[in-house]
Image (spheres, rainbow, N blue to C red):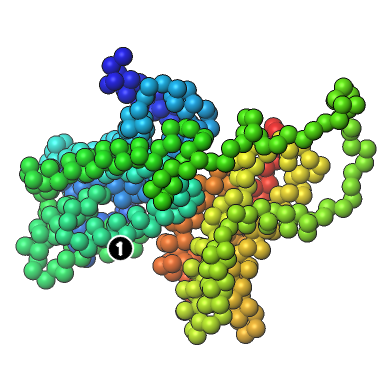
Amino acid sequence: MNRAHVLYHMVRADFLERVRRYSFLMTMAFAIYLAYAAATGKIVLSLDQYRGLFNSAWVGSMMTLVSTTFLSLVGFYIVKNAILRDEQTRVGNILASTPMSRSFYTLAKALSNFAVLALMITVLAVAAVIMQLTRAEDGHFQLGTLLAPFLWVGLPAMAITAAVAVLFETLPILRSGAGNVIYFFAWVAGIALGVDARMDDFIGFNVIGRSMQTTLKALDPTYKQGISLTISSDVRTNLRFLWTGVAWTPAVVFHRLLWVAAAVGVSLAASLFFHRFDPAWEWSFRGTRRLREAASGNGAGPVASVSPERQHLPGLLTPLTRKSGKTRLLQLVGSELRLMLKGLRWWWYAVALGLIIGELAAPTVESRGGVLVAAWIWPVLVWSQMGAREARYATQSLIFSSERALRRQLPAVWIAGVVVAILTGAGVGNRLLLAADWHGLIPWLAGALFIPSLALCLGVWSGTSKPFEAIYTVWWYIGPANRTPGLDFMGTTAASSKPTFYFLFGLGLVVASYFGRRLRVAYA
């Protein structure tokens, strides 16, 4: 069969499987919200006190930058499950038995990722057309000018995002929850370099922004070259200027196509680390392949021997005759805490201890808040297990069928998460308590309760750790790290803290976790 024909059907099948999921509807809702936010001024592209007239060039370029900036982040977390899904559904075992090469497979997965992200770009392109027709400040509608940024900037950005998602799924460390956190910081660094450097960046901020800045500088020599894409309705853009768009010369188009070539290269590079669904091999960072520990039989480990006289006894289950009156909550919390911390290396504890010492030694309130911000991002992979561990290790039937599982196990998980928050932030909490600084202690306590509540709720309802890892990392960066009022759930400053809101929000998340787990127990 023709290889192109096989590639097409692989991409098509994977794409159709994704778009039939509820998560895809949520993704499309997010894309529509981005379009709404840009159209209503909640997302503003500004050059100091200026913004461009809403003509085809400005609307198309602004919506393209909104698309590439946000979808390059959120889209990564949405599509970073293509290989994992084949492993979980055991489709990978079937594919591994075919002559299909590893490079062919990783390229097909990158293309299916790109198809999903390109559909979101298409939705935002349609929204840009509607925005031009409804909010235009220039009556001349130029479809080619409006769609050109989506074609030369939006699609290449989605191609590189799709390829990087496949690469992350094939590398040992990056395929885990740590990769979700690492990608966020890599994305932030990429955005910063793209804005500051004089080179073409994958989201297109430089190629579009430079054209805008050059035009404005010619009109206003006092313009200081500032440019920003801001999520805020308070940005003042009192001045307008006419911008007719990027000159899409062959050189500019060639540089954008280089990102497509880079995406293909990343997809092929991912095949070097892809294990082809062979459980006996995985890539080692030392540059060789190492054989996993052999397991007897089907990999289940040693089988317990059964005495001959008991081999022929009927398999009867003894019903519970009475309910135990002891909840043993402390033992359950200890067990959950040990499970959460299981597998962590000594250096993880060393860093956590260093952060606690830093909280105790920091001389000022501001510096203590900065150390606390670092201390409460460090256990993100510990919290992300909450509520999702049962689905990950397929232990729902064991846990949910136990006596009073809903009233015993769920509170124990939440308390264990709170214990992790209190311990890692103990330095700041202890100093605030000794100083009787209630204005600082109450927001600290609200944050310690809110973080595990968010982790538990997202884990229970999604069944995976990825939503918390993505949402919490972004929220942590926008809120506490930048001390944004309303979003600072740690209360790093008095002006940015809202402890009452986060107490109530955390309580609502716990209630939502209870009902989510109750549904799962009922259908277990």
Q: Count the numbered circles shown.
A: 1
Helix, strand or loop at label 1? It is: loop
Q: Amino acid at mark 1?
A: Val
Residue drawn at point x = 18 percent, y = 43 percent:
258
Q: In terms of image quadrants, where is residue 119?
A: top left
Residue drawn at point x = 48 percent, y = 32 percent: 278
Residue 250: x percent and y percent? 7, 42
Of the 4 image quadrants, the one containing the C terminus is top right
Residue at coordinates 47% horizontally, 79% vertically from top-left?
367
Q: Which residue is mark 1?
A: 235
Vertically, is 5 above or below 225? above
Name the residue at the right extreme.
321
Give the percent coordinates (x, y) of residue 150. 22, 40
Residue 110 in the figure: left or right of residue 420: left
- The quadrant holding residue 461 is top right
| Left or right for 336, reference 263 | right
Q: Is residue 118 visible?
A: yes
Position above or below: 52 against 517: below
